[in-house]
Image (spheres, grey):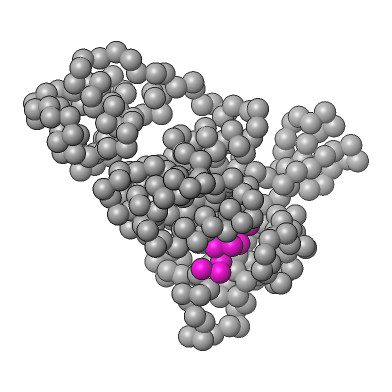
Amino acid sequence: MKIKEISPLEDDFTEVLERIALKPKTLYYRGKMPKNMVLGENGGGETNGRSGGLSERRRRPPTVAIVGTRRNTRYGEEVAYRAAYECAKMGAVVVSGLAYGIDSIAHRGALDAGGITVAVLGTPISRIYPRGHEQLGEEIIAKGGAIISEHGPNEEQGKIDMMKTFLERNRIISGLSDVVLVVEAAERSGSLNTAMHAIEQGRELFAVPGNIDRVMSVGCNQLLASSALVYTKPQDLIDKLFPGERAKGVKRRRKFVGGSPDEKMVMKSLREGIYDGDEIIKKTGMGVQDYSRAVTMLEIRGVIRAIGGNCWVVTEEWE
């Protein structure tokens, strides 16, 4: 597919980058840039597109960046996928970096929801990195999204300091977004660099709380201790991206208050971010049979579901 070269000001979606520090002079992209949403004369009836009558008003599509570690846990996978899926289903653009782990999961969630996602590379636009994500990159383009880089096709890969360029592209990921979500991050994760750019750029920053004993939760917990908002469910992002609107087709979640004492202990652990069955047993002190009976009953009632490896999450219908 043809590679296009523009300045940020030449496109509605990227012109927001003109207001960030170290703004890119030139961008290269493949695919289609997200189009402004057209609002009717009375502000309703949103559709995608840039053309219309004189009475139409337009706005940039709400955009969320979802980033995190390359070595995610099942918990991180579940959280990132759901966040991307629900935001994309509402019409938000999902931005990430096409890396292994949380980035690729976020892109996949948006694609599965039939939404638009944009990948920002730290490599020349002519070369997708990692190579294992070339197919994912092509799918992003085929389904109406874009791959963006500030490095042109003629730049030689071997002459690029990838450590430097991957950090530099983080300012573009956050700069394109209205809201940034960090899902899982170690103490020295590159995702924390994206978070710092988000703070400097005045973007809304969310972080996912995690087990204090896990390496991949340290970075997020540090963000929460300083300036980030606590992420608990997709609606947290949707409320920021679409003020005053409810998620289309999303039912109001039911609060779990009943059940046996063992079921309540399991639910309490899940709400606290403990998803591994062995850890739940250790924390609560319940017997293996009591634990098995509790999770079986909760699963039958549709309150929780397995995500593999004796790990569980609360389903979307319940909280």
Drawn side of residue 36 relative to residue 88, left or right: right
Does the stretch in magenta take in 79? no
* Image location of residue 117, percent across then percent down: 56, 52
Drawn side of residue 134 relative to residue 54, left or right: left
Drawn side of residue 228 relative to residue 154, left or right: left
Q: Is residue 77 visible?
A: no
Q: Residue furthest right?
A: 54
Q: Quadrant of residue 243?
A: top right
Q: Residue at x 20, y 43 (%)?
A: 309
Drawn side of residue 117 relative to residue 81, left or right: right
What main secondary structure does the magenta stretch of the protein show? Answer: helix
Does the stretch in magenta take in 169? yes
Residue range of the region highlighted in magenta in the rendering: 167-175
- On the rendered image, what quadrant is the C terminus found in? top left
27 w.r.t. 290: above or below: below
210 w.r.t. 248: above or below: below
Q: Residue at x 44, y 45 (%)?
A: 225
* Image location of residue 236, percent across then percent down: 52, 34
